[in-house]
Amino acid sequence: MLRKLLTALVLVSMVAVFFALPVLAESLSGKVEVNSWWTAGGEAEGLNALIKIYESKYPDVEFINATVAGGAGTNAKAVFKTRMLGGDPPDTFQVHAGHELIDTWVVPGYVQPLTDLYKSEGWTNSMPQGVLDIVSYQGDYWSVPVNIHRSNVLWFNKTIFTKYEITPPSNFDQFFEVCDKLKAKGIVPFVMGTKEGWEAGHVFESVLLGKLGADDYKGLWTGEVKWSDPRVTDALETFAKIASYLNTDHSALTWDEAGQYLLKDKGAMMIMGDWTNGWFMSVGFEDYGWAPSPNTAGIFLALSDSFALPKGCKNQENVVAWLKVLGSKEGQYGFNKAKGSIPARTDVDISDYNDYLKSAAKDWQKDAISPSVVHGAAASEGWSTEYKDIISLFVSKPDVSYAQKALITAAEEYLKK
Ligand code: GAL
């Protein structure tokens, strides 16, 4: 009897060791350093959800959460660049899919292809073709996208809209009618924070989209549509008019600080990406509504956050494990629920996401997709930076012909490259 019991025990332990082996082989130690700019409400929670998953899978790896504050990577991108070019690359860094990834890092040869990982993790089947395209170059995949964000969203304060019987404006005429009505009531009609230099460019890309439509807006970045087009003039004139309804302290505020106007029922509308939805969730604000920015119903101005693998990173194995978490169903579910974006994967169950996110997921399926310029999808970093600088200056000095000439010159310079 005892012998039988012992034999059974030995057998059971052998089986247990056999099945534990792959797990043991995966156990990692050392460090991993992940660089991003996710420090604001919603952003930080999304990142933390991913870190939690990573730490539970790899408890022996020291996770270095190397964030550099500043919306849209204002400061972080400069830090990544110094390190990458100086031969001290982080293990991985946040980068927008599209031109920012390909032109800045892939073509000059700073990052490693991830095609084998895509195949082993099945991402070629779980990510839609449109997303695979913007992380591809010469037949390889180069970064792991965690989400899809929408740029052209008009957020509004529901209490103010209800009190003054306002329906969300769907075109610019309605938008300005709403602005006049609210101004007369002492409410700041349109809120913006321009402290970091990218926010005006963010709003203006939605205005351009509203004036040119999905295809011709895209054409501005491919050279098919000229920046001398009268619709660009119209967009600049419209933007100058929008700026005349702004909060006067905009240059002292970041995007989320400006959002406080909505929280306090002092400001009515704001055009900002849907990380605002993540921020609203993180501060417990529920009194908001949303609509496509004027004249952009049926168009999704898109961007995607992704992470790339630098050549010469110090903790290759640990960081590949991080990339796997980013691309996993579990990772994308937890991250996006808090971040305010939708998963890049098509197979994540989002039935318990909030209403905004469910509506964004529907729109992503049916809308025309256009690339955001401020968030790296439409143009190279150099061009996007010039564009942002021109529009940022335009807010303080709204000279339409000067700005349009500068935009034409920038396009000529970068389309040649
Ligand atoms: C974008 C980024 C978003 C969000 C936003 C504000 O560039 O793609 O994830 O973080 O900046 O910081």
Image: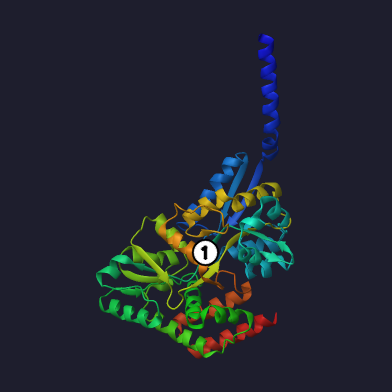
Q: Residue at x 70, y 38 (%)?
A: 25
Residue 173 on image: x %, y %: 37, 83
Residue 77 percent location from the top left of the image = 60, 64
Position of 340 with respect to 94 (left or right) is left
Q: Does the image show residue 305?
A: yes
What crowding class fits label 1: few (fewer than 14 Cα within 10 Å), some (14-19), or many (20 or more)?
many
Q: In this rendering, is residue 298 above or below 91?
A: below
Q: Residue furthest top?
A: 1
- Tell me if the residue at label 1 has its CB under 8 Å from ligand 1: yes
168 and 90: which is toward the camera: 168
Question: Mark 1 falls on what kind of element?
Answer: strand
- Left or right? Give the position of 101 relative to 68: right
Query: Total label count?
Result: 1
Mark 1: amino acid: His
- In the figure, residue 383 lies in which quadrant? bottom right
Q: Which residue is identified by label 1? A: 149
Residue at the (59%, 82%) spot, across then down: 220
Image: 201 above or below 141: below
* Residue found farthest to the front: 366
Q: Quadrant location of residue 269?
A: bottom left
Q: Is residue 110 visible?
A: no
Above or below: residue 363 compared with residue 404:
above
Residue 203 lies, in percent from the top left, at: 47, 75
Figure quadrant of the N terminus: top right
The colour scheme is rainbow
Residue 209 vertical placement versus 132 (above, below): below
Q: Position of residue 362 (x, y in %)?
A: 48, 63
Which quadrant: the C terminus?
bottom right
Residue that appears at 44% across and 78% down: 295
